[in-house]
Image (spheres, grey):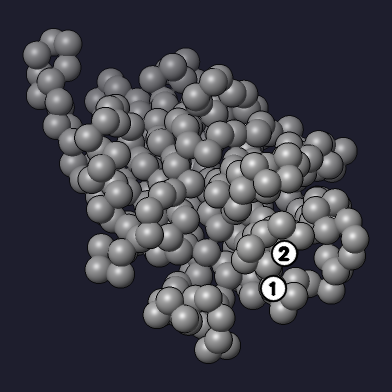
Amino acid sequence: MFEVSKTDSTILVRLLEFSKRHIHYDVFDAHWDNPKCDRAKLTKHLKWVVKNGGTLGFKGDLFCAMQGKYDPRASKSDIRPEHQNARYLDSLVSTAAEWFAPYAPYITDLCYGNHETAILKRHEVDLIERLAEALRPHGFKGVVGNYAGFQMFTVISGSDKASCRLRGYYNHGFGGGGPVTKGLIDFSRTDVYLDNVHYTSMGHVHQLTSDKTTVVKVNERGDMVSYDRWHLRSSTYKEEYKVLNGYHIEKGRGPKPLGGWAFEVRRVRAGDKVAIKMTPICLD
């Protein structure tokens, strides 16, 4: 069980009746409505999280939404039959609400990616807000999040609950995701201005990478302490390399891994202190 709320910058998730562990999966770049989306793999991963009593966040580009009238990228070959109608954007929301309904009670947040913000800019239609409202009758009790922000998990279990917090920063992503760095260099950029977070997660460039850095600081007592910071880059569910035609191929881009990073939250005790330990889990 969980409760979720939101400030201007932070998604707050309270894990209730916490026992040994909790699984959370932030899904980036599902591109669910694109014919190239591997829905079988997406379904497998979502069902695994739900089966393990976990929670789901959607951190942008749940929709591809590129086939609108005024989108210069539009291609009739990249639209599913159920969306080939005069109410294209409406049909995206209604079909997505039906498809994601079984997962609605487990979703903590729905956030924006560049594909959703492009629709908002061009068409003045908010796909994320509309999907959130459509999922509420199916049990969605989460929040609509920003393109980027902070995410805090708090374990509600025992008298020492206040000390059990996991702090993270998410950003749907930016840049082109160089073929050499595979997007990891972006974490070097965000580490310059981020403080006191246990993980940073991004998507957007369709790479599946992880990196762990150990951070050292001095606490208020003057003691040197260290903690681990994970950098997680989740990929996509859109397979663009099976047909050697189109934008992806013309730009010389290679095949991309499918899937993303979930993480396990565990409550650990070290002496008289209690904290949350985070362990990434690769879903591919």
Q: In this rendered view, identify the residue nearer to me: 281 or 275.
A: 281
Q: Which residue is mark 2?
A: 67
Q: Residue at x 85, y 51 (%)?
A: 90
Query: What is the three-letter code of the residue carrying label 2?
Result: Gln
The N terminus lies in quadrant = top right
In the rendered structure, the answer to whether residue 62 lies left or right of residue 10 reads right
Q: Which residue is mark 1?
A: 75
In the rendered structure, the answer to whether residue 234 lies left or right of residue 93 reads left
Mark positioned earlier in the residue sequence (2 or 1): 2
Where residue 204 appears, as percent x and y from the top left, is 47, 56
Q: Residue at x 40, y 80 (%)?
A: 252
Q: CA distance from mark 2 to mark 1?
A: 6 Å
Where 238 falls versus 106 (above or below)? below
**Residue 134: quarter of image:** top right
Question: Quick one: which residue is furthest to the right in this view?
Answer: 86
Query: What is the three-letter code of the residue carrying label 1?
Result: Ser
Q: Secondary structure beneath disc 2? A: loop
**Residue 164: quarter of image:** top left
Q: Residue at x 17, y 17 (%)?
A: 219
Residue 242 visible in rendering: no
Where residue 166 appears, as percent x and y from the top left, is 41, 32
Q: In this rendered view, identify the residue nearer to me: 174 or 70.
A: 70
Q: Residue at x 9, y 14 (%)?
A: 222
Circles 2 and 1: CB distance less than 8 Å?
Answer: yes
